Image (spheres, grey):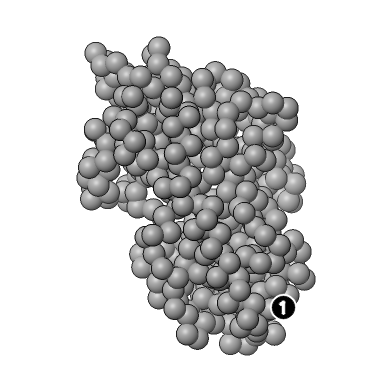
């Protein structure tokens, strides 16, 4: 088939969960013999070498710049109060992308349009033509502001989040019904949007176990969090950990260092909240030095949807993981064999300390996590399921 693949992100480098999903689906479709044209947004930090790498996979790659700022978010948030569209969709409605898609597809027929994530659904529906329309639902998006609202202390922001969740739920159900095929990351996301008889198969996120081996960790001491903290669920989770879990861990393990890797750390972490032995590394181009010193990999999320690819990555690196139930949702967790689950400050600190102080537990979690990725989340084994979508 000739497929137009619409992405909100440039799928390379593989430094975020949505990119990992997009890249391996894109790569599978191309290697399966489909002719794929990629149209995506790019941001100021995106690299030409990554666009060139994607051109070696796709028939062609077309990009449109997108800019985000705090003031633009405020403006679009205010606009959304009187609009039918949710803020998260309104924010990414870029006229240049609509015009570019109209020009790119003019005079050329495509057999299918693939909208990657809900944000690209309006573009897919407006420019699909008579061909097959496919939506890859990375998350049940409306559940994220709903969960954030439940933990939000600011009453005005709580009202805004509840309103956003309600509008997103209606938009999400309507958009899914307008696509010919909808693919879900987890069964839980599918049931959240359509509690009974939702359309489409579940195809989880997958990674490439062949791309890396478990890291040697001769003398680990770091408690490591990895993820963009500009994403509200990550910021909320790490602030909860720093305020309520880390004080217990740091007192019991004076040699441990909490290491936060990723862009956009909350400002309060640079002031009073961080406490002793907290290293805010920011964006790190080479993770290996930090990960080879990691004793426990933490996923303290209290809100979110879809799958946390950071858990698959940690398993792939051979790192023992402690996560909340929300953080581990959708992953193949097997009791205490491949991950420790903890949903309150006491159990999360206890689980972290058990790994720090228990060599045998650390080894078992590392080995079983790696085995889980190899058996359940290898894209070469899992993604032939896309053949049924594009039959």
* Residue situated in front as seen by the camera: 145 or 51: 51
Instruction: Report whether 88 appears left or right of 67.
Output: right
Look at the image and tell me in which quarter the N terminus lies: top left
* Residue situated in front as seen by the camera: 272 or 326: 326
Where is 319 relative to 308, above or below? below
Where is 180 relative to 345, above or below? above
What is the x, y in percent for residue 80?
A: 58, 29
Residue at position x 51%, y 76% from top?
294
Where is 345 relative to 381, above or below? below
What is the x, y in percent for residue 307?
A: 57, 48
Per the image, the residue denoted by label 1 is 248
Total marks shown come to 1
Residue at position x 52%, y 24% from top?
181
Q: Badge 1 local density, few (<14 within 10 Å), some, or many (20+)? A: some
Task: Give the quadrant of residue 188.
Answer: top right
Kindly state the secondary structure of the residue where label 1 is placed: helix
Query: Can residue 222 be seen by looking at this rendering?
Result: yes
């Amino acid at each position: 088939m000739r497929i137009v693949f619409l992405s909100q992100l440039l799928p390379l480098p593989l430094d975020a969960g949505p990119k990992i999903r997009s890249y391996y689906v894109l790569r599978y479709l191309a290697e399966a013999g489909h002719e794929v044209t990629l149209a995506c947004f790019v941001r100021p930090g995106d690299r030409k070498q990554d666009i060139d790498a994607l051109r070696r996979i796709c028939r062609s790659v077309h990009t449109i710049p997108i800019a985000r700022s705090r003031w633009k978010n405020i403006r679009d948030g205010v606009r959304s109060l009187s609009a039918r569209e949710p803020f998260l969709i309104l924010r990414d409605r870029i006229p240049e992308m609509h015009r570019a898609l109209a020009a790119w597809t003019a005079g050329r027929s495509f057999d299918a349009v693939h909208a990657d994530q809900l944000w690209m659904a309006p573009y897919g529906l407006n420019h699909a033509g008579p061909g097959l329309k496919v939506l890859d639902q990375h998350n049940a998006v409306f559940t994220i502001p709903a969960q954030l609202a439940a933990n939000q202390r600011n009453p005005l922001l709580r009202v805004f989040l509840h309103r956003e969740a309600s509008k997103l739920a209606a938009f999400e159900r309507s958009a899914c019904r307008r696509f010919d095929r909808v693919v879900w990351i987890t069964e839980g996301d599918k049931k959240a949007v359509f509690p009974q008889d939702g359309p489409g198969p579940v195809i989880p996120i997958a990674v490439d176990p062949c791309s890396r081996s478990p890291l040697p960790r001769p003398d680990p001491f770091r408690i490591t969090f990895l993820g963009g903290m500009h994403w509200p669920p990550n910021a909320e989770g790490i602030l909860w950990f720093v305020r309520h879990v880390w004080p217990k861990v740091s007192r019991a393990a004076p040699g441990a260092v909490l290491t936060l890797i990723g862009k956009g750390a909350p400002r309060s972490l640079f002031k009073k909240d961080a406490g002793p032995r907290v290293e805010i590394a920011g964006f790190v181009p080479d993770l290996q030095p930090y990960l080879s010193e990691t004793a426990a990999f933490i996923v303290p999320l209290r809100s979110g949807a879809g799958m946390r690819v950071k858990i698959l990555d940690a398993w792939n690196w051979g790192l023992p993981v402690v996560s909340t139930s929300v953080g581990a949702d959708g992953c193949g967790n097997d009791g205490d064999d491949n991950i420790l689950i903890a949903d309150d400050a006491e159990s999360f600190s206890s689980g972290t300390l058990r790994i720090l102080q228990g060599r045998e537990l650390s080894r078992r979690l590392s080995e079983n996590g790696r085995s889980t990725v190899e058996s359940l989340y290898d894209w070469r084994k899992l993604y032939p399921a896309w053949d049924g979508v594009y039959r």
